[in-house]
Structure formats: structure tokens, C-alpha cells
Amino acid sequence: MHIVIEGQDATGKDTQAQLLADYLRSKGQNVVHYSESGTASEDPFVQKIAKLNYGTKQDIDHRTRVLLYLINRYEQWRKLAEPTLKNGDTVITTRNWYSTLIYEGYAGGVSRNLIRHIHKEVMPERYFSPDKIVILTLSDEDRAKRLADQASKTGRVGEVFKSKGDSFQHKLNSAYLKVAKDENIPTLDTAGTVEEVHEKLKKLFKL
């Protein structure tokens, strides 16, 4: 089973993915969980690509980012997801190609047709048909508070994308809602406690 948890920064993707992975493991399932961003990867190659994408001082173009994200996306799918799914086990990913479509396409100005085309050329068919997918949402005010809290706790102050202004964040929010509607992807408001959201997510996924 392939599960995808999408959403803007600070909507709780990684937290909910980890809770869901722990829950499924408690039910006896073998689960592999990773973020397509690669920021938490133990793979040295994936780590290097992630550092290029998320460094605070750089001049990387949005089109270049599309390619860099695709590299990490493919490498992690090939090394982690494919073997796990072939074994009949569960893969949970935070983010998928919709993140690139939204951040680099809708908000960054790269041709959305180009993003879609190169992903279709590189990623296997199975990648585009997750068994369960959700886009997490949160109000602008609550998301801003969470971003500030994350930055102070992790030291990731000024990180690319998270440090972008309100206009960029509004573009992302509108794009996520549009993609959810166009692609018929369910959304889940993550206001409330972590535990409350976890229960709502399990109910949505019928787990």
C-alpha cells in the first residue's frame, strides 16, 4: 500500500506520517516512511541534493529545483519504495510530485506542462497511483505560528520557501486547493491537537 501525505509547510505532514507509520506497525504491518524532500534521508547522495535545494544562501532557479527534486524523488522511490511495495508492504511518503507542481509551477512560474511531462517520463506508472492520498490544510495564521516555532526549535531560520513572504504563501495555499479540486484529492484541516488530527486521518483513510 502506498500512502501520500501532502500539504503546505507546517501543516503537520511529517508528524502525521510518523504517527500513521507507528500505528500501522502496531497492527503488524511493515512500513517504510520517508519525505521526498530528502532533508531527513540517511542516503549521502540524497542529503547532498537536499542541501542544494534548502540552503539559505543560493541563486538556484526554480527550473533547476524541478530537476533536483526529481532526482531525489526518483532515487528514493527506486531505493526505498519500489522494493517495499514489491514485498507487499506499506510505503508512506510526505510530499510527492504535486509539491513540485505547486511550489515550482504555480508559485515559481515554471511551466506546469513541463513539470508534468518530465515526471511522467522519469517516474514509473505505479508512482502516480497511490492507494491513499490527502492534502493537509491549515489557516494562514496558524501555519505562520507553526513555521516560527519550527524555525526557533530547529535552527532552520530563513530557509528557502519557509521564509518566503505572505504573497508567496497565499499562492501556495490557493494552488493546493486548486490541485485538490482538479485531481479529486481529499483535504484535511489540521487545526487541533496532533492526536485529534491523527484520529481524523485514520478515519479518512479507513484504517
Image: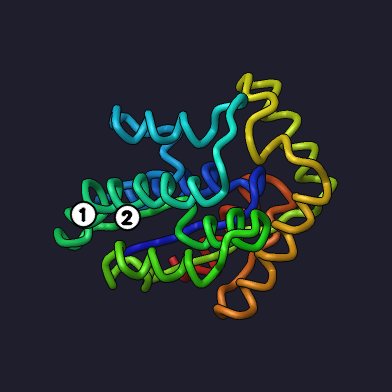
Label 2 to label 1, Cα distance in Å?
7 Å
Q: Give above or below for 88 relative to 61.
A: below
Q: Nearer the viewer, residue 106 or 17?
A: 106
Tag 2 near tag 1, CB within 8 Å: yes
Q: Quadrant of residue 188?
A: bottom right
Residue 74 percent location from the top left of the image: 30, 52
Residue 139 percent location from the top left of the image: 80, 54
Q: Quadrant of residue 44?
A: top left
Q: Secondary structure at mark 1?
A: helix
Residue 14 percent location from the top left of the image: 52, 43
* Label number found at residue 84: 1
* Amino acid on which the number 1 mark rests in the picture: Thr
In the image, taking residue 34 as reference, residue 54 lies left or right, namely: right
Q: Give above or below for 130 relative to 64.
A: below
Q: Nearer the viewer, residue 125 or 84?
A: 125
* Label number found at residue 171: none
Q: Quadrant of residue 134?
A: bottom right
Neighbour tally class for label 1: few under 14, some 14-19, many 20 plus, Cα within 10 Å: some
Q: Quadrant of the N terminus?
A: bottom left
In the image, taking residue 13 as reference, residue 206 lies left or right, namely: left
Q: Nearer the viewer, residue 63 or 207?
A: 63
* Amino acid on which the number 2 mark rests in the picture: Val
In the image, taking residue 35 as reference, residue 146 lies left or right, namely: right
Residue at the image point whose x is 75% and y is 45% from the top: 143
Residue at the image point whose x is 75% and y is 58% from the top: 171
How many marks overall? 2
Q: Which residue is mark 2?
A: 91
Q: Quadrant of the C terminus?
A: bottom left
Sequence-wise, which precedes: disc 2 or disc 1? 1
Q: Secondary structure at mark 2?
A: strand
